[in-house]
Every structure is written in C-alpha cells, then in structure tokens.
Amino acid sequence: MAGNSFGKIFKLTTFGESHGVAIGGIIDGCPAGLKLDLESIQNDLDRRRPGQSAIVTQRKEPDTVEFYSGIFEGVTTGTPIGFAIKNANQKSKDYSHIKDAYRPSHADYTYDEKYGVRDYRGGGRSSARETACRVVAGAIAKQVLSDLKFNAYVSAVGEIELHKKLHEIDFSETEKNPVRCPDAETAAKMESFIKEVRGDGDTVGGVVSCVIKNVPKGLGEPVFDKLHAELGKAMLSINAVKGFEYGSGFEGTKMRGSDHNDHFNTDGSTKTNLSGGIQGGISNGMDIYFKVAFKPVATLMQKQTTINAAGEEVEMQGKGRHDPCVVPRAVPIVEAMAALVIADYFLQNKASKI
C-alpha cells in the first residue's frame, strides 16, 4: 500500500490499524535542538481522543503517546522521531456482521476491489483512528513554528452556522464547550441538534474553519506546489472531508474584481484579505484562513440496504460506538495538518537559503 507519507522535508509516515496492537508514526526532518513540550503534544491528542464528551464515540482510549527515538532528555536530536499509541479498547466483535458486507459510503468495497483483502474491524487502515498519528506530528510541527497560532473551530453543524466575522471571534472560547464552537449560544444549539440526531440513530456533517496567524511571507511555490494547493491536499486527506475553500472561496465568485482585489498598504500588507493570506500560491504575511467540509458519518444505527462480497443485496445496521458528528473531534486534526504543511514549507525555505 502506497501513500502513507506526507511532506517533503518535515515528513510523516504513519502505520497501524484501528483494531491492531497500536498505531504510530515516524517523523523525519524535524530540526535538532528543539526542546519539546510533551504535555502540549498529549493535550492535542486529548482534544481528538474518543470518549471525551456525550456527543462523540464512547470508545474509551487513553491515547497516550510513547516516543521511542529522536528525542533525548526532552530535546530533538535531528534523527527520526518514532512514536506509537497503543489501542486499548477495541471491540472487534462489533464488526463481525460486516465481514462479508460492504457498508454504504465506506472504504469497504473499494478496499476489496483494490487489494483483494481488508481488515473489516473498524475499517482497519481506513479508520479515522489513524488521524491520531497526524495530531502527534502536527503538535510537534506547531512547536517548530512557535510564533504561529493555529486556531481551528467548528463553524457549522448541519444547517446551524456561526454567524460571526473573523475579527469578532474570540478563539479562547473554542475549548469551553464540547462542540468546539467559539460562541456559547451557537454551540448550545449545535450540541442539542447533535444529541437529537444521535437519538434518531442518524448522523450529521459540519464545517471546521481555521485561521493561521503570524505566517511568514514567502511560503509556497508558484506552480504545482502552491501553498493553498498543499493545504487543500492535506485537508482532503482527512477522513470524511468533502470540501475545502480558502480566502473568499465560493463566495468570491459572486463578486466583481473591483470589489475582490486586496489593495496594498505601504508596508506590503493589504487593506482587505479576500486572498486568504496567499497570493500566487505564496503566503503574503496576512492571516491564512480556510474552511473544511465534513460529511455525515457513514455508520448509522439504522437499517440500510447494501451488498455483500457475493454481490447479493442484504440488510445491515451499524453496531458499536460511533460519532454522530465528527467535527468536534476534527478540530485538532485540521490544526495538525495545517501545521504539517506550514512547517514543511518553512523548512524548505530555510534549506533554499543555505
């Protein structure tokens, strides 16, 4: 299986399955001499961890990361950083009913078609549990980029949206509720709706927005490796993501160029930021902001018609512990993938100047 690595200089390779012994990764290219805040890394993992509130999957995983190499006395050595997160609370029997059946809108059918074999327990390698490895690497990338601030938050659940402009949002409010929406009133509506959907045995999607502050100028390449293209690839590689837009996004298509252009101040900053901090594929020093759309979780606690490996139509129903809405736990994942992209380009810029 190809495609298990991300990045060019700051590079992450992940391994493991949802119901295997452990998941983990190797981070290559992390600079030497970086004193790591291990508590901060674990904190980001705790934000993604299952079982943290009543509106997420109740799988009880401690998600404690163990580091095996690349760190000595809390400082990076410049060698590959190896780590693992043990799986402690698998219930593989919850998936025995799909051993020969394909869950609608999952990777089951395509895995069988591509590889001829699949680990049906929790989706195996296709499980979103793999994203815990990205959170570890992203937390380290954030420490490489200590001057930058990555602020992701839930801006929509179903049709319930946060109606605030970016300058009106207080990011310190994001972690004060289980939905991770930085507005108490909107968060309460979202939480109530997620509980209602769960009670119906159904699921709902949503949107995670992200603002990156203090981004240096000059990150990104102007042709195939545009900064926003790599951010888009990073976000679209996250399980359940169906869309990505940055800056003015699709709303910008409704504007005239005379209204959309970001005019310069004398210091090179811009009076507006409809470009989303990126022009010509290169960061311009303004805040980078984008949105990531997540579909409803595909596993339902309702009966659905599907097919099995013999091509026969069968009826199935989800079992076990699943998220009714993935976006609250996706917030640290979006931050992590953004940090991996920015760290990689930051180190590429440093390398090009040596």
Image (cartoon, rainbow, N blue to C red):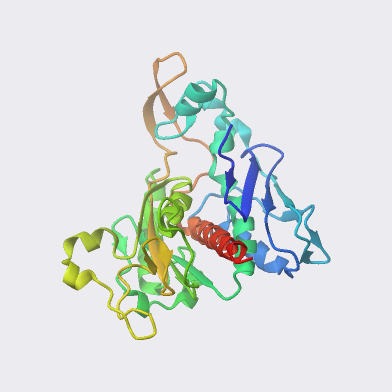
Q: Residue at x 24, y 71 (%)?
A: 261
Residue 21 drawn at (x, y percent): 72, 39
In the image, 95: left or right of 87?
A: left
User: How far across and down, in percent of the image, does residue 352 sit?
Assistant: 58, 62
Vertical position of residue 167 compared to residue 90: above or below: below
Quadrant where the image shows the C terminus: bottom right
In the visual, does 322 lie left or right of 229? right
Horizontal placement of 109 versus 50: left or right?
Answer: left
Q: Quadrant of residue 210?
A: bottom left
Q: Residue furthest bottom?
A: 266
Q: Which of the two residues, 82 or 226, is positioned nearer the viewer here?
A: 226
Query: What's the residue at 65%, 50% (across, down)?
Result: 61
* Residue 54 visible somewhere in the drawing: no
The correct choice, above or below, for 258 with respect to 23 in the image is below
Looking at the rendered structure, the number of numbered marks drawn on it comes to: 0
Residue at 35% x, 65% y is: 189
Choose between 25 and 273: the one closer to the eye.
273
Furthest-front residue in this view: 354
Q: Position of residue 108 (x, y in %)?
A: 48, 29
Image quadrant where one finds the N terminus:
top right
Residue 214 image offset from top left, x and y in percent:
49, 76
Q: Looking at the image, is 145 positioned above or below residue 204? A: below
- Whether residue 118 appears in this view of the structure is yes
Q: Is residue 16 above or below residue 164?
A: above
Q: Residue at x 43, y 27 (%)?
A: 316
Q: Quadrant of residue 135?
A: bottom right
Quick one: 230 or 87, which is closer to the camera? 230
